[in-house]
Image (tube, rainbow, N blue to C red):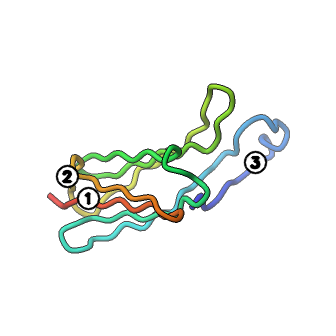
Amino acid sequence: MVEEIVVTPFFKRHRGHMPATIKLKADISEVGQDVVLESSVKGYGKEDVKVSASANSIDVDLVLERKDSAEVKFHNSYFTPKPIDPSKLKIELKDGLLRVTAPKR
């Protein structure tokens, strides 16, 4: 879920700008031979969520808003407790829950 949006005095004066801080809460755990990331992205569809990974992190990009031909995006990287195989990600988005499963190396 988009956990927190903090609006500073600057953004209250300049309403056309995005808030200063956005956080996406995610839980990462080891389940057997996999590393699993789960996050609530309720209200966002498959076209709004992009997931990628490296050997030590899972990256989530979320399109917060589409305006004309531009997109306002959020990006966060989550470090994994063990190295993973980024070429074998399993990504599921169902009922607002994002679940990313990656096998450990």
The image shows residue 39 at horizontal and vertical percentages of 47, 63
Reading the image, the residue beneath label 1 is: 102
Reading the image, the residue beneath label 3 is: 8
Q: Residue furthest bottom?
A: 32
- Amino acid bearing label 2: Asp
Above-or-below relation of 66 to 19: above
The image shows residue 62 at horizontal and vertical percentages of 52, 46
Tell me what residue is drawn at x 23 percent, y 66 percent: 34
Reading the image, the residue beneath label 2 is: 85
Q: Quadrant of the C terminus?
A: bottom left
Name the element at disc 1: strand
Mark 3 or mark 1, which is nearer to you? 1
Q: Residues within 10 Å of mark 1 (few under 14, many from 20)?
A: many
Q: Is residue 37 left or right of residue 56?
A: right
Labels 3 and 1: the sequence-earlier one: 3
Tell me what residue is drawn at x 27 percent, y 64 percent: 35
Q: How many badges with numbers are in the image?
A: 3
